[in-house]
Image (tube, rainbow, N blue to C red):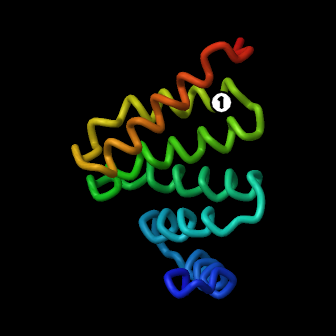
């Protein structure tokens, strides 16, 4: 549905997936997609944090490449909410696991996003 330009229908299906999810992999995946369909930053942050929490519980390597992106998403939400200390912490956490990224266009984009976010945090009033 998302690929067919039907975001409301996609959001409904992702919500059903969340409700039926049985393990951390399924919960991570559903929460990640639900975050993309939130109408405001607070809602996006809630679902991005859930996705990150479940991803961190997955004990195999299947999700490690997603961690930098998840940290970037959470950091950006905190930044948009002017919670700069939390934003900075999440950008730093993303950078600490950027070695999981492939050295391709996507990996470079995420890495640049994390560096740019951290740079924006310089000069902010972070205690």
The mark tally for this picture is 1
Dot 1: few (<14), some (14–19), or many (≥20) neighbours within 10 Å?
some
Residue 82 location, quadrant = top right
Which residue corresponds to the image point at 39% horizontal and 52% vertical from the top-left? 66
The percent position of residue 94, horizontal first and vertical second, equals: 44, 36
Quick one: quadrant of the N terminus? bottom right
Identify the image quadrant of residue 123. Answer: top right
77 to the left or right of 111 = right
**What is the residue that sits farthest to the left in this orientation?**
103
* Nearest to the observer: residue 109 or residue 42: 109
Q: Residue at x 65, y 87 (%)?
A: 9
In the rendered image, residue 73, in percent from the top left (x then y), is placed at 56, 47
Q: As displayed, is residue 83 above or below residue 49?
A: above
Q: Nearer the viewer, residue 20 or 88?
A: 88
* Residue 41 percent coordinates (x, y): 74, 52
Residue nearer the viewer, 30 or 7:
7
Nearest the camera: 10 or 89?
Answer: 10
Compared to residue 4, the image places residue 95 above or below, namely above
Q: State which quarter of the image contains the C terminus.
A: top right
Name the residue that disc number 1 marks. Answer: 86
Question: In the drawing, does residue 122 fall left or right of residue 92?
Answer: right
Q: Residue at left 42%, top 66%? A: 25
Question: Which residue lies at the image location 49% right of the left edge and 82% below the top edge?
Answer: 3
Q: Is residue 22 left or right of residue 19?
A: left
Residue 28 coordinates in the image, percent (x, y): 49, 63
- Helix or strand or loop: what does disc 1 sit on? helix
């Amino acid at each position: 549905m998302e690929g067919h330009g039907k975001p409301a229908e996609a959001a409904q299906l992702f919500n059903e997936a969340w409700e039926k999810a049985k393990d951390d992999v399924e919960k991570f995946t559903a929460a990640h997609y639900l975050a993309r369909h939130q109408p405001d930053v607070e809602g996006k942050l809630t679902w991005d944090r859930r996705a990150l929490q479940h991803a961190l519980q997955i004990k195999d390597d299947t999700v490690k490449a997603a961690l930098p992106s998840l940290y970037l998403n959470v950091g950006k939400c905190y930044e948009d909410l002017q919670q700069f200390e939390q934003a900075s912490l999440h950008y730093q956490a993303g950078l600490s696991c950027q070695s999981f990224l492939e050295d391709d266009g996507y990996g470079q984009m995420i890495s640049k996003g994390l560096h740019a976010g951290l740079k924006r945090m310089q000069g902010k009033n972070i205690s």
